[in-house]
Amino acid sequence: MTQSATFHDLNGASVYITGGGSGVGAALTDGFMAQGANVAFIGRSEASGFVEEMRDKHGRAPLFLQGDMTDTELLHSTMVKAADTHGPLNVLVNNAANDQRHSLEESTTEFWDRMIEVNLKAYYFACQEAARQMKDGGAIINFSSISYMMGNAGYPIYTTSNAGITGMTRSLARELGPRKIRINALAPGWVLTQKQLDMWATPEDLAAHLDRQCLKEHLKPEDMIAPTLFLASNASRAMTGQCMAVDGGVVVSG
């Protein structure tokens, strides 16, 4: 996808992305690197092929730090490693999430804990380490989802986490604002990653969702790049504590 804008202040920025090796996260890694940023990302799955793809495309490679971000000590250590390599973080993107389908009836306490660890706890503690590093200010973007705004059924712990992300974002914006750290949430609509196509996207559900969108075109991972770059750059210097929906016009606010 051709970049629609250049954000000059992101050139040379130190960026850390959770889940930056696949799906939306991979698109974000590509997008930040195209701006000249130095990107580190954490992921559980092996990503050397993607790293080489980025090296071939951009002439340099992102720093891949393999591990489980729900291990807070490990998460923090990878963020310190990113700072050692690229300098203290300027931008954190909390992107990784698990939208596994489930019902209230079948949920166990173990499943609850795992889902909250991935979808909320890891976000919070990534913000903690990023704030430690951002001595001269910075930007944090927390990926939420319009799913909780729509009141979607089928994954109630996931939607609970999304609502929590928005609340956390608002509170941390108030706490971190005096330190020139901006923190915003980005709420995508239904982005058709390969995982979504393989696991959840039935023709009937796709048609129904598209009917709800104002813009009659399904969203792709690349559609999340420019909005994220905007929130990361000084172009949005007066924005913090906000939740920006990028969904083709399904939900509205204001």
Image: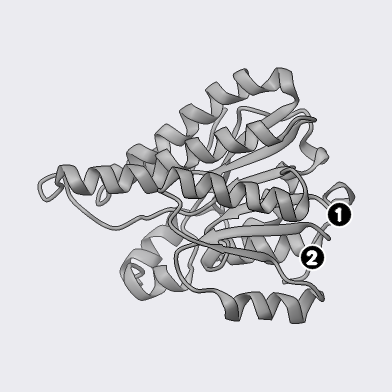
Q: Quadrant of the N terminus?
A: bottom right
On the image, the x and y values in percent for residue 212 come to 44, 53
Whether residue 152 appears in this view of the structure is no
Q: Mark 2 falls on what kind of element? A: helix
Please tell me how crowded label 1 is: few (under 14), some (14-19), or many (20+) other residues with Cα within 10 Å: some
Task: Give the left or right position of residue 135, taking residue 158 as reference.
Answer: right
Name the amino acid, label 1: Asn
Q: In the image, what residue occupies the spot 74% across and 77% down?
A: 55
Q: Mark 1 falls on what kind of element? A: loop
Q: Quadrant of residue 109?
A: top left
Task: Give the left or right position of residue 195, taking residue 139 as reference.
Answer: left
- Find residue 178 and name its label: none
On the image, the x and y values in percent for residue 222 come to 63, 65
Q: Earlier in the sequence, mark 2 or mark 1?
A: 1
Comparing 237 with 94, the one in front is 94
Q: Are marks 2 and 1 in contact (CB under 8 Å)?
A: no
On the image, the x and y values in percent for residue 62 come to 69, 66
Name the amino acid, label 2: Ala
Q: Is residue 95 above or below residue 177?
A: below
On the image, the x and y values in percent for residue 178 come to 72, 17
Q: In the image, what residue occupies the spot 61% across and 24% down?
A: 173
- Find residue 34 and name its label: 2
Q: In the image, what residue occupies the spot 40% across and 68% down?
A: 196
Q: Residue furthest left?
A: 105
Please tell me how crowded label 2 is: few (under 14), some (14-19), or many (20+) other residues with Cα within 10 Å: some
- Find residue 11 and name its label: 1
